[in-house]
Amino acid sequence: MKVATFLTDFGVLDGYVAQMKGVILSQVDARLVDITHDVASYDIRGGAFILQSVVPFFPVGTVHVAVVDPGVGTDRRGIIVITRDYVLVGPDNGLLIPAARRLKDFTVYEISDEKNMHSSVSSTFHGRDIFAPVVARILKGVPFDELGFPVEQFVDLDFGQAEMTPSGIVGQVIHVDRFGNVITNITGVQLVDVVSFDTKIRVGIGNRSMNVPFVRSYGYVKKGMMLGTIGGSGYFEIGVNQGNAARKLQVTSGDVLWVAVG
Amino acid sequence: MKVATFLTDFGVLDGYVAQMKGVILSQVDARLVDITHDVASYDIRGGAFILQSVVPFFPVGTVHVAVVDPGVGTDRRGIIVITRDYVLVGPDNGLLIPAARRLKDFTVYEISDEKNMHSSVSSTFHGRDIFAPVVARILKGVPFDELGFPVEQFVDLDFGQAEMTPSGIVGQVIHVDRFGNVITNITGVQLVDVVSFDTKIRVGIGNRSMNVPFVRSYGYVKKGMMLGTIGGSGYFEIGVNQGNAARKLQVTSGDVLWVAVG
Amino acid sequence: MKVATFLTDFGVLDGYVAQMKGVILSQVDARLVDITHDVASYDIRGGAFILQSVVPFFPVGTVHVAVVDPGVGTDRRGIIVITRDYVLVGPDNGLLIPAARRLKDFTVYEISDEKNMHSSVSSTFHGRDIFAPVVARILKGVPFDELGFPVEQFVDLDFGQAEMTPSGIVGQVIHVDRFGNVITNITGVQLVDVVSFDTKIRVGIGNRSMNVPFVRSYGYVKKGMMLGTIGGSGYFEIGVNQGNAARKLQVTSGDVLWVAVG
């Protein structure tokens, strides 16, 4: 079984993603799985977060193609990131890097092979004309050396690391999901070192702070109540049971957030 | 061919559904078909309606997994519902039951097998960590007795039954679809007993009532005109040809509605 | 490998598309690829544009089913359009025709075979009860003559042709994509005959006109700047780098637009 996944900011209205899939299926039979196409337009950081949260759950050998690409058609490079178990394909703008780091050791290739390209390469749609043909060729087993060459340099991106300070852990909001849950870069591992489940913890965002129950899951508090928990990606998140925490707190991606210790 | 379908309120933004699919494909090759991920957050009833309308159209042997789950992480159970032709997997909160009833005889198993679980079961994402592994194991042919045990009790849910009264049929709005069509729990069978196609019928909602043509399909009335018809699921529905009836009537799921007889 | 694609205005909320897919998979194993289900309700022209932009990228033999169908349940016919490499299935309302023309020579069949139909044909859901069974039978290799019969007449639809006038090329907006890019019926071939990349061109819409750089792709201008380019479908389009041109220009599908020559 060959599998490819797709993450873009193309939306689904215009059939752009379907064009990519058509190009791939024209060359190779594969299971095609959408991650999302609703990344906010040009939001590389948001796309990178979602990508890294999904990639490790797929079968070994899966090729993940991701396109959030404000620089399309300029001289930004296309890259292939090779990890032990997966291959990532997309623009060299940081989008693929958090996923690559989560997958541990990785090698970056710059895409160079002109033979990959769809017969009429458009300069506005590399997803279809460059990345999809590369994905198809990888799934067919074409060696990476025929698709590009290894490079040392690439555009990096990370979500920062939450820091331990004497008064608490200081982190950042890295994603607000569709339920309005506020996901931070404080890891579950960092947090459970200093606070215990089923206690109240003190959380600050901007110039507000509040006590919230720290629980194993949303269902542990009443409907409408705020809570802190470790989410499905292993990060500390703040939510409202069956409600929207981001709206309530007026929080957005990038905001600083702290959890008091002791 | 193995087939699994997916119905959730996760949306597609965050890649949660893709994580479930990755877990399944890591264990078994299967066709994965989305029903919808746009069920209103935590709307068990709305999800249950859509699920029951879709399940019987799939190949025998299809496993349908549905997750609309405000109680995730509490002690609500996960269940497997076994019917003659299909298997349903999801939380024990009523979501699966209207589909099960439509499929006639069914047996409910409580999920118990810890071996199913993804190595790091998160307490907030049972879709990925419990239900998806169970789906994969069912598709691989693991006997149900290795996944759980039969139970007599489960959380029930129904859409009520429209009632015949001397003055008419009294029912309820069970779903408003994306076109604004108002779908009721009055069945086509109940209705055609008492009214005829191509006549005017009297319909009441709240304290309003009106005469609408009862026709075989939307195209039988002019653009912008209201009508009653039997929809694709076999239920009586009120629509506006190329317009939005729910908005026009200010109707929402759960509202009472009657059709006069004679 | 058998492939079917799907384009509708059904949205994904209600599971209508999943019902179609279930009907097909019940008869034949195939890769099922969504083009889009977010065509504006009843917007045949918008659906036709997206369909024609996608079809040629799929493997030879793909069956494309498209349903944007305000006339469902009336006596509008269902048709099969046979081209050298693909088959299109849908209502006879023009939706399939621009795609058929792009694929060159084509033959139109009227669907007639009652044996195709799902056992209980609903008069409101031909997508599931007529078109999906026809798609399944085509994928199984049933001869077209068993599904219908050739007809000379069909409902036509085109996007008009941009015209060369002494003062410039006069065309029309045929689509606004999800980024707000304004796609016209002026072809790249027409345009590059009279203007050169990396020059300023004069563009008029309504009673406004402006000079915009004509570039190979969006990344060639600064963020927020307007530009003209040849889009991924080969048509002239106006965009704003990382912005929304349609909103800025108050432009919508059908508006007249010109590009000055010289």
Image (cartoon, coloured by chain):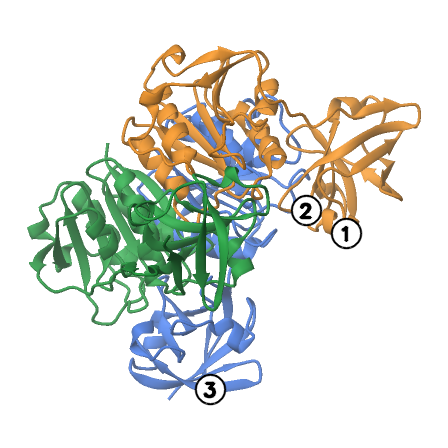
Chain colours: A orange, B blue, C green
Residue identifier under label 1? A248
Question: Which callout, 2 or 1, points at the residue further toward the start of the chain?
Answer: 2
Report the residue at 41% width, 49% height from top.
Answer: A14
Q: Quadrant of the N terminus of chain B?
A: top left
Q: Is residue B256 above or below residue B33?
A: below
Residue located beneath label 2 in the image? A180
- Let me know if residue A28 appears in the view: yes
- Decide: is A69 above or below C41: above
Residue C96 position, x and y percent, is 24, 55
Tell me which amino acid carries mark 1: Lys
Q: Name the amino acid type tagged 3.
A: Met
Identify the residue at horizontal 8%, vertical 62% (top origin): C152
Which numbered disc, 3 or 2, marks the residue closer to the eye? 2
Residue found at the far front of this picture? C262
When the figure is inspected, residue B162 is found, relative to residue A144, above or below; the finding is below
Q: Nearer the viewer, residue A200 or A147?
A: A147
Nearer to us: label 3 or label 1: 1
Give the CA distance from mark 3 to mark 2: 41 Å
Q: Which residue is mark 3?
A: B210
Residue C97 screen position, x and y as percent: 22, 56
Q: How far, Cα to Cα, is label 3 from label 1?
A: 42 Å
Q: Secondary structure at mark 2?
A: loop
Query: Which amino acid, mark 2?
Result: Gly
In-front residue for pair B134/B77: B134
Q: Quadrant of residue C253?
A: bottom left
Q: How many marks?
A: 3
Q: Is residue A216 visible?
A: no
Say few, some or many: other residues with alpha carbon within 10 Å of mark 1 (under 14 / 14 to 19 / 20 or more). Answer: few
Q: Chain of mark 1?
A: A
